[in-house]
Image: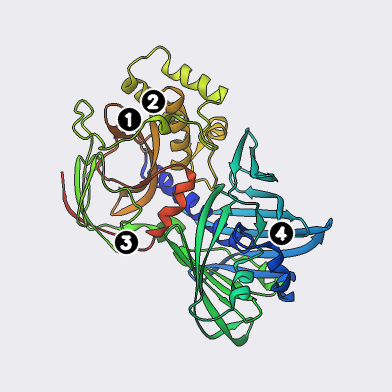
Amino acid sequence: MTISGRKISYAGIFIFWFVTMAVLLFRHYGLNQNIAPAAYKTVIPDELLEEQWMGVYYKGEKIGYAGRKIEKKDEGYKVSELLKMRLNVMDTQKEIETITNAFLDSGLRLKSFDFTLKSDANMIIRGRVEDKNLNVEIETPGAKSEKVIRLKDSLSLNLSVIPDILKQGLKTGKKFTMAIIDPATLTQENMFIEVTGKGPITAMGIKQDAFKVKGEFKGTEFFMWLTEKGEVLREESPMGFTLIKEAKENAVQIERPSLDFIAQVAVPFNLKLPHDTNYLKVMLSGIDFKGLELEGGRQHLKGNMLEIRKEEIQDSKFKIQNLKSLDEYLKETMFIQSKNPQIVSMAKEIVKYEKDKLKAARLIYEWVYKNIEKVPAITIPMATEVLKTRRGDCNEHTTLYTALGRAAGIPTRIALGLTYKDGFFYYHAWPEIFVKQWIAVDPTLGQFPADAAHIRLITGDIDKQAQILSVVGKIKVEGMEYR
C-alpha cells in the first residue's frame, strides 16, 4: 500500500467525531425520561420557540451552520434541526448534512422522530414510540435494519437542557442529571449538567451577561453560555468545535476550510518505528485511564507504562483473563448484521469448507483487504452497506470484517485506538478475533496479525465509539522501547 493509501486508512476518526457532534447538537432536543411533561409549560420562554441559527467553527474557521425550529403541529409539536458542515479531509472537501425531526403530543411526549445523514453514504434512522418500546428502523441505499429499544419510562422530548435549568433555577452551582437517547447510536445514556458561573460574553455584536453551563457525556465535556431567558449564545464542543449564535444570513455562509482534520488530531511520537513492530513500550499521559481497555491480551499496563506485543499465533500465552463469554462476539447488531443472508452467503463463499478458525479468519482478512477500496468516508458504517459499495476507510473495513467473522462462527470484536505512521499516531479501528487468544488483525492496512504499533483504547460497537473522544486532543504517547 502506498503512503497516501495508508493515510487514507486513518480517516476513520470521522465516525467518532460525527457521532459525538450528533449527540451534542441533539442534546437540545434530547429524549428526556426524568422530567414530567407538564413542567415544561411554565418554564419554556418565548425565545426558545423562535427559529435559532448558529455558525459552526473548527479552531476558528467557519465550517458550517445549525438551524433549530419548534412549531405547533397536529395538536402537538414538531421540533426540527438542520446541521450542515464542510470539512477538509486530506485536501478533499467533504460535506455533511443531518436533518432531525421529532414529533410530540400536546404533553410534549415523544411520538416519533426521523434522523437523516447525508454524506458519503446516506442513512435514515426512524423511531416510533409504542407503549414502553421505541421501535427503530435504519435504512441505507443497500439495506434496512430494525431494533426495538425497551424504555424505562415513557419518553418526553426535552426541548433542551434549558427548561430543566430554568425550572430548578438558573444559578451557579446547580447540578443535575438527564437521561437521553442518541439518535445516531440509539443508546440510552446519562448526561451530567452543572451551572459553573456567570460573566460577560459577546454574541452578534452585543455584550451581555450569560451563565456558563458545563455538560459531560461519556467522559467528554462540552460548554454553553445561556442568557437568563435561556437563549444559547455560544457552545464549545470537543476537539475545537464551537457554535456561535448568528443571524441566519450570516450563519448559512460556509467558507472553504483549510485545516486538515486528520492532521489536527494526530498524536506526535518521538520514535521512528519500523513497518512491522513486534514489541513496543510507551508512556501514556494527559488522560484518565478509567473506562479504557488498555489491559488485556497483547497489552499490559503497569502504572502509566504500556507494553504491547504482537501476538505469536501459535502460542496462546497471551490469553485474556476472566473472559466471561464469547457469545457477545458472535451476536448480530444493528450495524454488524452477521445473520443477514448476503453476509452469511459471502462468508461461506470466502471460507468455503475451511474448518480451522484461524485459517478461516485469514481468508476473510485477505478478501476484505483486497476487495474493499480504501477511501476516506464520513458514514455510520453498516456491514451490509459496505458489502454493497465495497469502499471506505478503517471503520468500513472493520465493520464488514467483524460481520463476516461472526457469520463464520469466529468470535470477533471491534477495537478502537491509535496506530503509527510517519512520526504520528492516528486514530484507527481494527478487528480482534478470538482463536485460543485474542488476536488483532488489520484488513485496512494489510496486517495479520496487526503489529505492536496498534494501541487499543476501547472495544465495542458504534455505541462505544463516541467514548474515544474523551482522549482526543489530550493523550500523549512517549516511546520508551521497541523492537
x and y, in percent, of residue 375 in the image: 49, 42
Question: Which residue position is annotated with label 4?
Answer: 80
In the rendered view, tell whether residue 346 sits above or below residue 256: above
Amino acid bearing label 4: Ser
Between residues 436 and 395, which one lies in front from this camera angle? 436
Disc 4, SS: strand
Between disc 3 and disc 4, whose residue precedes?
A: 4
> Distance of mark 3 from mark 1, alpha carbons?
29 Å
For disc 4, the neighbor class at 10 Å (few under 14, some 14 to 19, many from 20) is many
Amino acid bearing label 1: Phe
Between disc 3 and disc 1, whose residue precedes?
A: 3
> Distance of mark 4 from mark 1, alpha carbons?
44 Å
Q: Is residue 124 visible?
A: no
Question: Which residue position is annotated with label 2?
Answer: 410
Disc 2, SS: loop
Amino acid bearing label 3: Ile
x and y, in percent, of residue 120 in the image: 58, 45
Question: Which residue position is annotated with label 3?
Answer: 287
> Distance of mark 1 from mark 2, alpha carbons?
7 Å
CB-based contact (under 8 Å), mark 4 and mark 1: no
Between residues 169 and 61, which one lies in front from this camera angle? 169
